[in-house]
Image (tube, rainbow, N blue to C red):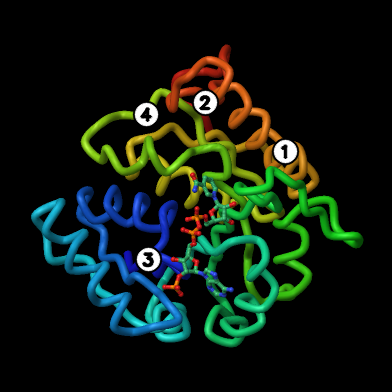
Amino acid sequence: MKIGIIGGTGREGAGLALRWGASGEEVIIGSRDAGRAVETAKRLNRLVSVAAIHGALNQQAAIEADVAVLTVPYAAHVAVLVEIKKALRGKLLIDTTVPFDPKTHEWLPSIHYNSALEEAQEVLGSGVRVVAAFQNIGFHLLKDFRRVIDCDVLVCGDDADARRLACLLAEKAGLRGVDVGSSRHAGTVERLTPLLMDLKRCYNTRAAGIRITGLPEHTP
Ligand SMILES: NC(=O)c1ccc[n+]([C@@H]2O[C@H](COP(=O)([O-])OP(=O)(O)OC[C@H]3O[C@@H](n4cnc5c(N)ncnc54)[C@H](OP(=O)(O)O)[C@@H]3O)[C@@H](O)[C@H]2O)c1
């Protein structure tokens, strides 16, 4: 499967690329700058000793991808979605966005939507299936790519097959994916991220995460 990571030169995107590259998936790092994408891909390939990670402009990464993953700051969320909308038609987009400024710790809610996921689905329309995932998994955990992360990836969105595929990709990244259902839960999941950031600060750890207990071993 070809995974195109839009904004993959950044912290979250590169962390996911490392893990998917190491697990044998073909990854395309997307960027506004093709040179930066290629350099990032080369650096990540060296780290995981593979040649499966390539670099391209965001638009090209979206065109080539079977599944696209969006990892740009919330400030660029809508603009980037509009740019890649056509290329994503008929595909799955996994949105990792939290509407939060990590520098100022300011929550940046859209006036019209309860979550970044619902905003993305509205911008992309029904021709693109959108799920939200990985919003609670910090890049510090991802970049240690050999390590199994003791956190769940909560996956939500309005298409059950798309959620299943995102859960599978979470597993390939060394995490457990938990299907939490429709897009109405996305606001809750996104809001857990600033809570986790405060916990990390309070307890002086980068490892704080979410784990759902009591689920059967093999979730549907
Ligand atoms: N960092 C985390 O631990 C973490 C955890 C969970 C979820 N997330 C979510 O993941 C997303 C990315 O976070 P991050 O920390 O990886 O961000 P980042 O490193 O600051 O940025 C990611 C990439 O986005 C691109 N970008 C930046 N500004 C842009 C703009 N105005 N227009 C288009 N592209 C732009 C840049 O790529 P180019 O310059 O190469 O185009 C950059 O490398 C956010 O929505 C965040 O909420 C992050």
Report which residue position mark 1 lands on. Answer: 191
Dot 1 falls on a residue whose secondary structure is helix
Relative to residue 172, is residue 186 drawn left or right? right
- What amino acid type is highlighted by mark number 3? Thr
Which badge, 4 or 2, is on the more N-terminal residue? Answer: 4
Q: Are marks 1 and 4 in contact (CB under 8 Å)?
A: no
Report which residue position mark 4 lands on. Answer: 149
Relative to residue 131, is residue 49 drawn left or right? left
The quadrant where residue 218 appears: top left
The location of residue 210, given as percent across then percent down, is 56, 25
Q: Residue at x 54, y 58 (%)?
A: 94
Report which residue position mark 2 lands on. Answer: 209
- What amino acid type is highlighted by mark number 4? Ile
Q: Is 102 located above or below residue 84 in the figure?
A: above
Q: Nearer the viewer, mark 1 or mark 4?
A: 1
The location of residue 142, given as percent across then percent down, is 36, 41
Dot 2 falls on a residue whose secondary structure is loop
Q: Residue at x 75, y 37 (%)?
A: 188
Q: Nearer the viewer, residue 49 or 196?
A: 196
> Mark 3, residues whose alpha carbon is within 10 Å: few (<14), some, or many (≥20)?
many
Report which residue position mark 3 lands on. Answer: 9
Q: Are marks 3 and 1 in contact (CB under 8 Å)?
A: no
> Mark 2, residues whose alpha carbon is within 10 Å: few (<14), some, or many (≥20)?
many
Q: CA distance from mark 3 to mark 4?
A: 22 Å
Residue furthest front in the image: 104
Q: Are marks 2 and 3 in contact (CB under 8 Å)?
A: no
Which badge, 1 or 4, is on the more N-terminal residue? Answer: 4
Q: Is 8 located above or below residue 191 in the figure?
A: below
The location of residue 46, given as percent across then percent down, is 11, 58
Q: Nearer the viewer, residue 2 or 7?
A: 7
The quadrant where residue 206 appears: top left
